[in-house]
Amino acid sequence: MAERAEKLIPFLWEGVDKSGRKTRGETEAPNAATVNATLRRQGIKPVKVRRRSKPLFQMKRKIKSKDVTIATRQLSTMIAAGIPIAQSFDILSKGQDNPSMRDMLISVRQDVEAGTNLSSALGKFPLHFDELYTNLVGAGEQSGTLDVLMDKIAVYHEKTEALKSKIKSALFYPAAVIVVAILVTAVLMIFVIPEFENLFHGYGAELPALTQMVINLSKWFRGNWWILLGGIIGSIVFLVFTHKRSARMRHIIDRVILRLPIVGEILRKATIARYARTLSTMFGAGVPLVDALESVAGASGNRVYHDGVMEIRSQVSTGQQLATSMEATSLFPNMVVQMVSIGEESGELELMLAKVADFYEQEVDDAVAAMSSLIEPLIMIFLGVVIGGLVVAMYLPIFKMASVV
């Protein structure tokens, strides 16, 4: 078993080149002596070599899927230009602002330089390079078309990232408004309504039913807010924990999400688009359909569709047609099934799946735009009923006193 490559340390250096000009730079090496030797081989006389110090308080930044998408596109461009893989990763790592991303790219480069194939080197980071990614890279390495496959991966990631971004932006606005409404309501219940309650204490007459109900609700909220807050936090933690740990709970939660009005339909269309895009990319790369379906299931993003795709995979492995297996799950619209059937019969399955993906990505765009225009009046109604109702309830006794006077 080959020994693992020595750990590389970042060094800053200053020197003088053959023309007598001062130059400086940064390089990685096991020690300062190696840096000096490397510079001399390059015709540079080292003047100063020092280890780059780390910041005293350096928080480890998370690697986002967007970072991987951008790096994939850059890597695709460099490989297509004929730059060796190890050198491409070296260039990528030096251009990273995120230390975690840079360290990961350096690790991949070291493994490649040590003789490991790229798919295996990437497979050591399954959180960022999933089975779909490594399978496509492996197919490209075996067929000698890594440049073509990297371009396919880059296109796939860019379209997937764009789809996710649209859905997140569509859901962020209503979620933010609801959170603000809850906070405003809590402030009114805890601080504002008690002041009105003191004002009405000497009123002497019976308060309007709406006002009395709001005051009672405020008293309960002040006495039991910690139970309500604890229940909400506990429910969220429970759902998140069980969603991660229990496949059955993931299936139940994802099925409920798919049945939500408006949002559920958007997520269903996004999942179908992701299914078609992923399968088209895998099939076009020459990955066998049965193997491709396993990766597609993992990339579906929804447990209901994950289980459905695994069922499709089981049926396809016994010789059944893909379209027939998809129809049996009742998860795909008739149009999708028919297009897949035409693709199988004509030998253009990759093209038909890509057309399905394009169609449903456009459907998601249109649905998000429609939801954005629909959600604004609904939010105004919600705020009017909740916040406006509290304000009206507090001013009803004042209006009553003014009418008496």
Image: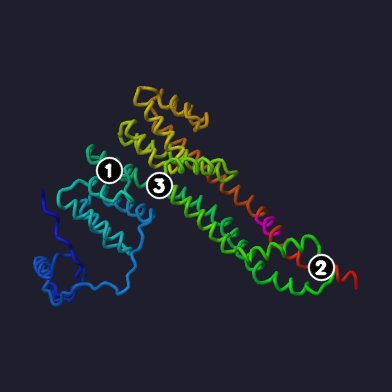
Give coordinates of residue 264: x percent, y percent: 55, 43
Cα–Cα span, label 1 and label 2? 72 Å
Q: Quadrant of residue 353?
A: top left
Rendered position, 309 above or below 267: above
Say which residue appears at 38% left-offset and 56% top-offset: 64
Query: In the rendering, at what x and y percent does residue 288 appear?
Result: 31, 31
In-image side of 220 versus 315 (left or right): right
Using residue 62 as the reference point, say whether residue 26 is left or right of it.
Answer: left
Q: Mark 2 or mark 1, which is nearer the start of the sequence? A: 1
Q: Amino acid at mark 1?
A: Val
* Labelled disc at residue 397: 2
Q: Earlier in the sequence, mark 1 or mark 3?
A: 1
Label 1 residue SS:
helix
**Which residue carries the number 3 mark?**
245
Residue range highlighted in magenta: 379-384
| Separation of residues labelled 3 and 2 (CA atoms) | 53 Å
